[in-house]
Amino acid sequence: MTQRAAFWNAVATLVALGLIFFFVDPAGRAPDGARFLARQHPALVHLPIGFLLFAGLLALSRRWRKDEQPGGVEQAALLLGGWAGVAAAAAGSWLVQMGGYPTDVLFWHRAFGFVIPLAPAGILLLSLENFGRGLRTAAWSLLAASLLIGGHKGGEMTHGKQFSGEYAPALLQPILGEAPSLDTRFDLSSPDSSTVYETIVAPIFGAKCTSCHGEGRRKGGLDLTTAEAIGTHETDTEDDPLITWGAPDASLLIQRVMLPVEHRRAMPPLPESKPLSHADVELLRWWVDSESGFDGTVAAADMPGSIRSILQAYGMGEIKTGVFALNLSEPDTATVAALNTPGMRLTRVAVDQPFLDLACDTASCLRIDGLEDVAPNVISLDLSGTDLSDDDLALLERFPHLTSMDASRTALNGTGLGALSDLAFLTRLNLYGTQVDDAALDILTDFPALEAVYLWETNVSDEGVARLRDALPDAEINDGRS
Amino acid sequence: MSKNTSIQDEARLGWAHLQTRRHFLKSFSAGIGSMALSSIMGPAALDAFASGSPLSPGPVRLDDPLMPKAPHFPAKAKHVIFLHMAGAPSQHELFDYKPLLQRLDGQQTPPSLLEGKRFAFIRGVPKLLGPQATFAQHGESGAWVSNHLPHFSKVVDDVTFLKAMHTDEFNHAPAQLFMYTGSPRLGRPSLGSWALYGLGSENQNLPGFVVLISGAAAPSAGASVYGSGFLPTVYQGVQCRSDGDPVLFLSDPDGVSRDMRRRSIEAINEINRQEYAETQDPEILTRISQYELAFRMQMSVPEAMDIMSEPEAIQTEYGIEPGKVSFANNCLLARRLVERGVRFVQLFHWGWDSHGAGESEALNHGFVERCKETDQAMTALLTDLKRRGLLDETLVVWGGEFGRTPMLENRTGQDNPFVGRDHHSDVYTMWLAGAGVKRGFSYGETDDIGYQPVSGRVHVHDLQATILHQLGFDHEQLTFPFQGRDFRLTDVGGRVVNEILT
């Protein structure tokens, strides 16, 4: 090949690419005849890769042999690779017109795709014109980088971002910068100490919102990058506040992300941004609904089952609350077995947990030898219908972890209930069908953990019940009358 | 020769027979023959369970299969009361209020709604039928309840409605089997049997799984809806009656004293134990424990079933009908049984199949009667359980085997004074209460005529998974090996409906 031929080849390549670049409008409509060729783009792109890789290997071997001039085969490979690249660029440009590709990835794929056919033409020219070695090395490097990055971006469009690096060794993962997998998206390893905002909400904002609503762009005047910016944001007067704690439907943030995607006010706006998943929306709703604010922890938030199952899919372990968070030692199996006698049932609440339920037919079971060894494991005690007396209640201090106590249908009058005030976990107290009266209820006002008290068929008065309801506003006080 | 010795002799004779045949095969033939035989005879299934997965709820104690056992995780529900309205009540006349359906009453159903649909009876193009009831919102939750349930409308704040239930079957027997066994065909264990198998029984003197039937007929799928399938039969439901002998054939025949009954059961069980030692058939152990349970039940059942011992105010509150078989009696019984530690109480009340083909099954006649028969009692049951603190640990489930169409079914095509609706499996309403289920909540929505679901669909397998979840079980782990694979209630489906749980 002559220098003159290499020159005109470079000019022709430039003209061809220019025609493609300026006359195939990405927003236009691909001509019907070109559509078939367009769809061959994924196959065509492999032609330049093959030719140019072959030419590159020949050039390397030449450098090893200290041979300066490219041979005929190498020239042919560069020529073919270059014009195959032009064909691929044309097909690719028509494919863009057929639509459906993410704009940010497409931009880089297209840019490098146009460099690829230019590079071999340039290399040919540089080699034959005997330009300096440095320039040729630079041209080869540009070609190699264009092939790698352009090709990778193309793969990303068809297979998604994670495709190539998904199974990379852990060591390589951070270098490749792949998107985190499902169970590392939120760090839910310590729900007791991490806040809903920092652990769940901020990562969602960071991934889906802050590229527009960040410190730099602040579209619509909204900055979602800091708690302070979110907390002090003021919305237009005709809109609801950004966040109304406890009322997601009255919060502009939630309203916008719940609009149908085709609505012009829906956030994030399609097609240029990443949509929120159903789980993202549910989590944001929960953040607002649970009134977690910016300091409430994951464990402390009132968590409906639907949110629990979403967070468990993101790798959250079981959240243990109340008595279940305690690390109790296993009850002695032989002791438990020996205590299971007629009239006394001691059962595990679950196969792999150290907690026990105790149900007795007579109150004397509280005095049985050996029970004190497993008493700390007992979380529920059923003495209903037994001969339980107020004096027996003093024995309950041996059961520090009781959550539920059923003393219904006994002769209790409630004078001994004070003995239960140290039971920090006692949430449920069943006193129906006993002789307890208002004096007993006044004792119960000091039991802040109580969630349910049953007082049907007792001697309590409406006033006594009202006082207890005032003292324990969150508890359900059931006197069977309402 | 007394009767007693003749039984003993018979047993010895039987044993001798076994000696000649089985004993020979077992003891004297070597290799494959004996191995095959022991695997056939041995309680392979129970052995497999005993050594089962780490999450399996403790081994079945062959000598005490009803011993209380721990579930997979702490349970919210210790008991379940399932109020099954057999025949499938219409959601359009009870809970799923659709003003548009009222406006479209009498209009032809658009063909687009009928494309690809099959109905049990509707042929051609049916007319839409507006709700045959008036609706109002009740409670703080604002739940829509019709005028047919004046009592129940006062307790809506205690229940969660599932408005978009759906099932795979549109005929009664298969749909009932599907609801209770997870399969529309015979042979699988029922929900109550799975519960009993997993948890054992709290009360060793009462059956752990009791079935109470009222209404004009028994459930059309028969006793299989409370059968134990391939589980040991000790886990099957025991039908009790609120009138006459609570359990058929439980009382001693004339001339047989309790002492004689005790001695005869001891003798029979001794023979059965010998038989078991020989054949290792686990069903023999089931039989032994059933005899013993029956003997204990002779004392405990009449006491538990005696609703007349309840205070009069309670009897009135439920609206019981002394000396009759009634849903109200059964509701009161259900509470008494749960109070005594019965694990699973299954009520069936037949008569909800409101096709409109006759007075008893018309929405404007029989259906109204069924509502009257059940409304007060099921409300009293919820209230009574609640004030006793039992609703915290008792899951109450109400519903039918499927729902009914928003279209009028007119089988004869002639003027018909009775209105009715056809079977509909795509969407229907059920409700749950107690044991960790949200209060005053509604899950799932249907379209403007209540014909198809819009959101929050709950499949029968999902409901089963949720009930097992409240009992402390992972429905995928509560399994039993049978015919070479592990079976579970929810087959290969089921999702716990976390949305309705607290």
Image (cartoon, coloured by chain):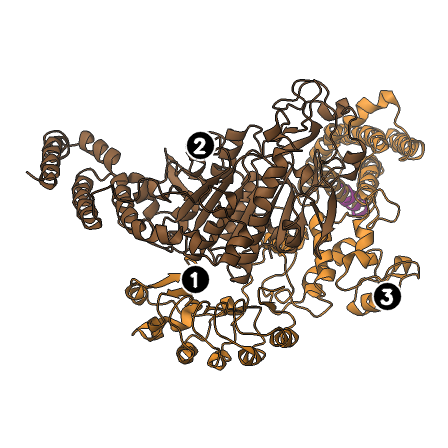
Relative to A319, residue B167 above or below: above
**Mark 3 crowd level (few <14, some 14–19, many ≥20, 10 Å Cα):** some
The type of residue carrying mark 3 is: His
Q: Examine the rendering and report whether any part of residue B76 can be seen.
A: no
Residue B129 rendering spot, x and y as whole percentages? 73, 30
Chain painted orange: A
**Label at residue A233:** 3
Is residue A309 shown in magenta? Answer: no
What SS does tag 3 mark? loop
Closer to viewer: mark 1 or mark 3: 1
User: Which residues fall within the magenta stretch?
Assistant: A134-143
Residue at mark 1: A353
Q: Do labels 2 and 1 share a chain?
A: no
**Mark 1 crowd level (few <14, some 14–19, many ≥20, 10 Å Cα):** some
On-image quarter of the N terminus of chain B: top left
Say which label, 1 or 3, has the lower sequence index. 3
Relative to A112, residue A466 above or below: below
Structural distance between the alpha carbons of marks 1 and 3: 47 Å
Residue at mark 2: B222
Structural distance between the alpha carbons of marks 3 and 2: 65 Å
